[in-house]
Amino acid sequence: MTGKQPPEAWESFLHYLPCSEEDEKLGMVCTTAGSIETAPRTVYPPRKNEHPALFRSVAEGRALPEFQIVYITKGEGSFTAEGGTYNVQPGSLFLIPPGMKHRYSPLFETGWHERWVGFRGTYFDSLADEHILSRERIFFDMGLSDHLVAIFDGIFEEARTQRPLYQFKACAGIVSLIAEITARERRKQPNHYQKIVEKAKYLMESNIYSTVNLSGLSEQLGISGSRLFEIFKTYTSMTPYQYYIHIKIHKAETLLEQNDISVKEAAHRMGFEDQYYFSRVFKRTTGFTPSQWRKLFR
């Protein structure tokens, strides 16, 4: 959406959300959510005394024990983290990982409207491990988006009402925000990167019965193995090896549904020299052993 200011559906508010042991076990917890408009020529942050001490130094610099996503829909300012400073405009979004020293504030002359949500948990830690939540990518030009505002508003509704399963529903909104950020980043990648991924997939499909030889694959594509890993992971959320194994196991599923194909023969046809390794990979991928699969789908 361009040329239109998204509706400011919420008055300024902030909430710090409680969570139960059951919420913690899910690996996803929403810790805080809020929406505050700082008027022009106003000292920032407004309502400073309503924040816990850890959160009051937003304009001076702080590091938090959680992730935060901050979305600016009005006004201008600056965001500084890891030695870099970014000019904030309407549509700017920053994704701040735990422990990262940062600060942000609007221009005194313009103020701004910010929405934010804080979150933590083992699920989000796993996204960081997979570089979906990356310390190298923290500032995004998302543009003014009614869709993003609607996701935030859904999280705010859960924070306000705290109805049954509010933590679960709020975290579903957080995952949606992360998905929107990730999708936008992938759309920004050069077209020739997409062509590399498509050619890599074609070569894997064409050599599905061979042994895994990703170094040879990268040579055919004319790039280094590390570069192939980076590009492929960005586009598919899988490494080249994970994708190759996935399509091999999917083909093996079809083979095992045939009455005359044994587990050993299926492993051999799919390029696995070790039948037992094939069985471990098959179960890790499908949740079933090859023998269990044969019984289920015959």
Image (tube, grey):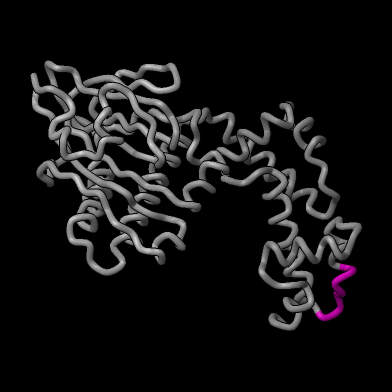
| Image coords of residue 46 (percent x, y) | 13, 31
Residue at 40% across, 23% down: 81
Q: Is residue 114 left or right of residue 10?
A: right
Pick the quarter of the image with the N terminus.
Answer: top left
User: Residue 211 versus residue 76: which sits nearer the camera?
Assistant: 76
Q: Quadrant of residue 65?
A: top left
Residue at 23% across, 20% down: 77
Can you say whether 122 is above or below 98 in the image?
below
| Image coords of residue 28 (percent x, y) | 42, 55
Residue at 43% across, 36% down: 97
User: Residue 57 versus residue 137: which sits nearer the camera?
Assistant: 57
| Image coords of residue 130 (percent x, y) | 57, 43
* Residue 175 visible in rendering: yes
| Image coords of residue 145 (percent x, y) | 25, 39
Can you say whether 30 is above or below 104 in the image?
below
Residue at 75% across, 57% down: 248
Q: Quadrant of residue 111?
A: top left
Pick the quarter of the image with the C terminus.
Answer: bottom right
**Number of labelled discs?**
0
Q: Is residue 179 left or right of residue 113?
A: right
Can you say whether 63 is above or below 60 in the image?
below
Q: Is residue 238 left or right of residue 120?
A: right
Q: Is residue 257 left or right of residue 181?
A: right
* Residue 4 visible in rendering: no
Q: Which residues are magenta?
A: 259-265
User: Residue 33 versus residue 189: which sits nearer the camera?
Assistant: 33
Residue 88 shown in magenta: no
